[in-house]
Amino acid sequence: MPPRTKKATPSAPSTMKELKDTLWKAADKLRGSMDASQYKDVVLGLVFLKYVAEAFDAATVEIEAELTEAGYDAEQIEQLSGDMDDYRGRGVFWVPATARWDYLAVHSKGLSEADADGPKSIGKLVDDAMDLLIGANPSLRNSLPRGFNRDNVDQRRLGELVDLLNNIRFFGEGAQRARDLMGEMYEYFLEQFARAEGKRGGEFYTPPSVVRTIVEILEPREGRVYDPCCGSGGMFVQAEKFLAAHDADKTALSIYGQEANERTWRMATMNLAIHGLNGNLADRWGDTFALDLHPNVQMDYVMANPPFNIKDWARSEDDARWTYGVPPARNANYAWMQHIISKLTPQGMAGVVMANGSMSSTSNGEGDIRANLVEADLVTCMVALPDRLFRSTGIPACLWFFAKDKSAGAQGSIDRRGQVLFIDARGLGFMVDRAVRDLSGEDIQRIANTYRAWRGTASAAGAEYEDIPGFCASVPVAQIKEAGYALTPGRYVGAAAVEDDGEPLDEKIARLTAELTAAFDESDRLQTEVRKQLGRAL
């Protein structure tokens, strides 16, 4: 009998695309009989554990090298390298010994040493690791998933996923590069889960191009940034990327968020931790309408994608937030907007994703609330988005932008009090596949640069704003009032100008008439010929 050949160890993926695809395929095998939300918790939780364990290992190497250079001997290094505060001071979570990845990888096939209750499965080891991680890092309390040892989690495939992750190294080119890679991969997983869950995926995922459009218009550089329905934290992550792109200090922004869904809240806390962001998401999840977890905290920026048109929400008619009118019981759109406005500082700004109906609805008092918002000079810009940007819903969407102060010197050099900028971006974007459209970087910058020029911001670099038929228009409040306070951009920007080809109109009409007549004659000729051929065939 020929000797058995040892099965080759799978090699580590060599590119980011290969890494993403390999991990997704491996993770997708776990789905089995699991509920989609539980499956998401298992995969993202495991990826998070891998990252923090590897960050811990990298910090250990760094600390030991520093101690060696300082002249400490091996025994002293072993003692001093166990200082939890040293790790936390480097922005690294303390990882207890049996929660470290090397330990889990060795036992990924369920071959751990037997204890009083027998061998532990890999799922039990991961659950224990999560508990140990939370115990050592109070900031992670309530935020990490468990349930890896449930009956409906395939332990063999969970072990295979641990094996695969073991072949991947995030660290190697520096801590920041590792964080960037992990953040990119985490966002990829969120996108894939949103695709897999369809409509429910919209509860935790907003297309990055939509988020980036909001961030590029608001340009949050310092102060408090808030999202009252933060999902997985995408708004905060994009704000951090904006700062990084402008070589700005990300600690200049203080993050505040709230999320009603427990599992989604956990995703947000892990997402922020991976990106190195110290976010104040309170210590629990909760309904923003029922209980504001950040009471009396005023925000410099608010960015949000609230669930569209929700009918079942915690409504109280005497709520102090309803300054501009009591929102209807069966639609929370204007409740979200008024809550957001109530959180803004006197110089605060906000960008909010809303269903298109919010721009023109007059049912149940919504038209009156919208009129009051316009008359209070809070609406600064309206953007009509292209269709099919969201996989989770077919409802067309738009962006509302609010500013408490539109005078010169507030967020720009041009006084825009009593005016609203309308941008019709429905013609922008490209098809990613047969079902979904996306905005390109050029599309996003065109929208943002239009706003910057209109407002006269420093980033406009002196560009002058001008109305562009079919795309943008600066409209006085008096004109909006005449239109019944409808805020649909297409109503104000008009049609795009048709380029003059230089041909006189009478000559063009004569030419087109001749061409149409010739086409009719050719059609008659072909029809006669077809009838003749059919007659011969019969």
Image (tube, rainbow, N blue to C red):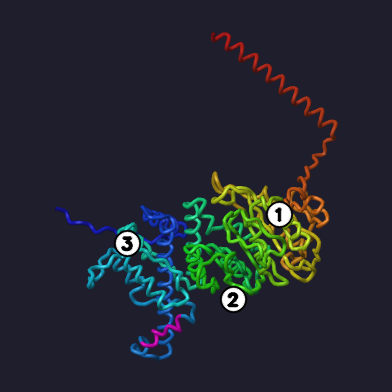
Number of other residues with Cα within 10 Å of mark 2, as a class: few under 14, some 14 to 19, many 20 or more: some
Closer to viewer: mark 1 or mark 3: 1
Q: Are marks 2 and 3 in contact (CB under 8 Å)?
A: no
Residue at point 65%, 14% (across, down): 528
Residue pointed to by mark 1? 365
Residue pointed to by mark 2? 251
Amino acid type shown at disc 3:
Gly
| Callout 2: SS | helix
Picture quadrant of residue 142: bottom left
Q: Position of residue 237 (x, y in %)?
A: 56, 66
Amino acid type shown at disc 1:
Gly
Amino acid type shown at disc 2:
Thr
Q: CA distance from mark 2 to mark 3?
A: 38 Å
| Nearest the eye: 231 or 371 | 371
| Callout 3: SS | helix
Residue at point 75%, 22% (across, down): 517
Q: CA distance from mark 1 to mark 3?
A: 56 Å
Q: Earlier in the sequence, mark 2 or mark 3?
A: 3
Q: Position of residue 287 (x, y in %)?
A: 55, 64
Residue at point 68%, 17% (across, down): 524
The question of residue 80 being in magenta is answered with yes
Picture quadrant of residue 120: bottom left
Q: Position of residue 499 (x, y in %)?
A: 78, 43
Q: Kindly identify which numbered label has been placed on residue 159.
A: 3
Drawn side of residue 298 relative to residue 154, left or right:
right
| Callout 1: SS | helix
Q: CA distance from mark 1 to mark 2?
A: 42 Å
| Nearest the eye: 154 or 370 | 370
Q: Is residue 532 above or below residue 390?
A: above
Q: Which residues are magenta?
A: 79-87
